[in-house]
Image (cartoon, rainbow, N blue to C red):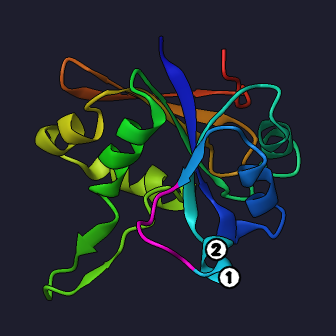
């Protein structure tokens, strides 16, 4: 059965870390042991449920605040996390490697439509669809890959796990 996961940037709001760690199923996207200050500012993957305080806050005070993106995936959280860890770095034209903040909706909305067909297949491997807030935070953009073509649908919906 598919599950909804949030890729949440704890650095975006002081409240987020506590909301994330209150969820029963979450992991930091970064590996290794991190000091508390770094953990509080890291990106996380969280299995979302409509009853979570995180979802309730994201749908109210978090709208328009670029807290993160969501994805619907068939795999359990550790496998989905492993998939996303492949995208944590990007190589700049000068060869320098940098942190790629794909979980930021401001980055996601610009980046994903620029991907070629091969890149899209990699992003959608084991992912049914992605969603993020629209630019003004008033709606939701959902990204589907259908027959190798990226489809983007805008709706007024909020985050729902069902």
Dots 1 and 2: beta carbons under 8 Å?
yes
Residue furthest front in the image? 33
List the residue tagged with mark 2.
41
Residue at x 75%, y 41% (from the top left corner): 138
152, above or below 30, in the image: above
Task: Name the image quarter holding residue 44.
Answer: bottom right
Q: CA distance from mark 1 to mark 2?
A: 7 Å
Q: 91 left or right of 150? A: left
112, above or below 72, in the image: below
Q: Helix or strand or loop: what does disc 2 sit on?
A: loop
List the residue tagged with mark 1.
37
Of residues 59 and 154, the one drawn nearer to the viewer in this rendering? 59
Image coordinates of residue 76 in percent, x first then y, are 44, 29
Residue 158 part of the magenta segment = no
Q: Residues within 10 Å of mark 1 (few under 14, many from 20)?
A: few
Q: Helix or strand or loop: what does disc 1 sit on?
A: helix
Q: Which residues are magenta?
A: 28-34
Task: Name the image quarter holding residue 73.
Answer: top left
Image coordinates of residue 69 in percent, x first then y, are 56, 46
Task: Name the image quarter holding residue 9.
Answer: bottom right
Number of numbered discs overlaid on the protein picture: 2
Residue 32 part of the magenta segment = yes
Image coordinates of residue 37 in percent, x first then y, are 68, 82
The label shown at residue 69 is: none
Of residues 139 and 73, the one drawn nearer to the viewer in this rendering? 73
């Amino acid at each position: 059965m598919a599950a909804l996961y949030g890729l949440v940037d704890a650095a975006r709001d002081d409240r987020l870390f506590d909301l994330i760690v209150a969820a029963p199923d979450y992991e930091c996207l970064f590996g290794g042991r991190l000091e508390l200050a770094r953990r509080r500012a890291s990106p996380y993957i969280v299995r979302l449920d409509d009853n979570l305080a995180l979802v309730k806050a994201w749908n109210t005070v978090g709208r328009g605040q670029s807290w993160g993106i969501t994805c619907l995936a068939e795999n359990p959280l550790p496998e989905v996390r492993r998939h996303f860890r492949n995208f944590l770095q990007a190589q700049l034209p000068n060869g320098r490697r940098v942190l790629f903040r794909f979980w930021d909706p401001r980055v996601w909305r610009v980046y994903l439509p620029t991907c070629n067909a091969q890149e899209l297949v990699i992003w959608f491997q084991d992912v049914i669809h992605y969603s993020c807030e629209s630019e003004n935070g008033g709606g939701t953009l959902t990204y589907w890959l259908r027959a190798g073509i990226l489809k983007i649908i805008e709706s007024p919906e909020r985050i729902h796990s069902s």
